[in-house]
Image (cartoon, rainbow, N blue to C red):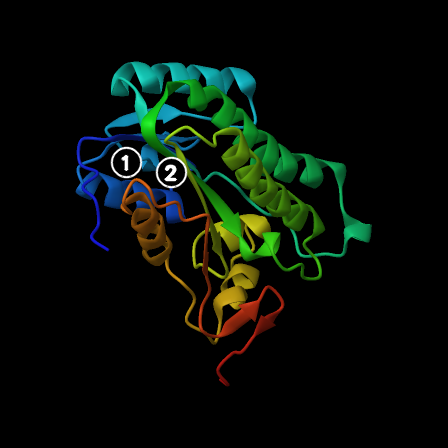
Amino acid sequence: MDAIDISGKTAIVTGSSSGIGLATVRKLRAAGVRVAGGARRLDRVEGDVVLELDVRDEASAAAFVEAAVAELGGVDILFNNAGLALGRAPFTESTLDDEERVLHTNVDGVLRMTRLVLPHIRDGGHIVFMGSIAGRQPYPGGASYIASKYAVRGFSYAIREDLLGRPIRVTTVDAGLVETEFSLVRFKGDQARADAVYDGLDPVTPDEVADCVMFALTRPPHVNLDEIVIKAIAQSSGSHVVRRES
């Protein structure tokens, strides 16, 4: 199955200042796609259009979409990538602040960005969601994040139903351990705990996840990849990892 040429298309990528978002922006631009990158840290965003974006805030998201569409002239690809996890404690130790930040970013932000961008997506467009294996297989100590990623997976299928009959594709990419700043954010800046997540194994890289996104985007127009699941060979689920002996 030959890849289709996506050069000349336009894309919006949220959470584009690091990790999977940044890697995907680079690959999209290398393929000739004009990209509007949104994030809170603008100095780290690479894009043809660089705009501040907080997906948790309606006014910020609306202003971002308006400016991005004006600059791009329309949207062919939306990559809902912004997301985070906080903590690895049992839910009995959960806090309101952490719950709100995770759910407002991972769920509300995804719904909000999709709602705002969808009127501008042209026929032949593609919506990609950054999911997680946490949205498929629960593990201890991640209840809020797991709930958010199950919601993303459900929403991706719901929007697929609502768009049925229109030439707009919908894909979710569910990743396992990917070595990014994700764990550093999860452990609130504790570098040692973040490093320990990836110790003794070869995690998936942001570029490898971005390759999955690009594969979905470049399938023939009649082919919809509903889900892509990518994990390190050393990981079978969120709670089962084999590490090398030190």
Disc 1 and disc 2: Cα gap in Å?
8 Å
Left or right side of 22 for 106 = right
Seen at 38% across and 38% down, the residue is 16
Question: Furthest-right residue in view?
Answer: 92
Number of marks in the rendered image: 2
Q: For this rendering, which residue is in front, 199 or 172?
A: 172
**Can residue 23 be seen at all in this image of the molecule?**
no
Give yes or no for contact between labels 1 and 2 (Cβ–Cβ under 8 Å). Answer: yes
Identify whether 78 is placed above or below 190: above
Element marked by disc 1:
loop
Q: Mark 2 — residue? A: 16
Identify whether 206 is placed above or below 51: below
Seen at 30% across and 40% down, the residue is 221
Left or right side of 86 for 220 = left
Identify whether 77 is placed above or below 225: above
Quarter of the image for the N terminus: give it: bottom left
Left or right side of 167 for 132 = right
Element marked by disc 2:
loop
**CA neighbours of label 1 inside 10 A, class few (<14), some (14 to 19), many (20+):** many
Q: For this rendering, which residue is in front, 36 or 164?
A: 164
Give percent across and percent down for residue 118.
44, 23
The amino acid type of the residue labelled 1 equals Glu
First along the sequence among labels 1 and 2: 2
The amino acid type of the residue labelled 2 equals Ser
Q: For this rendering, which residue is in front, 209 or 17?
A: 209
Among the 4 quarters of the image, the one containing residue 22? top left
Q: Mark 1 — residue? A: 46
Give percent across and percent down for residue 4.
21, 44
**CA neighbours of label 2 inside 10 A, class few (<14), some (14 to 19), many (20+):** many
Seen at 53% across and 39% down, the residue is 156
Left or right side of 26 for 52 = right
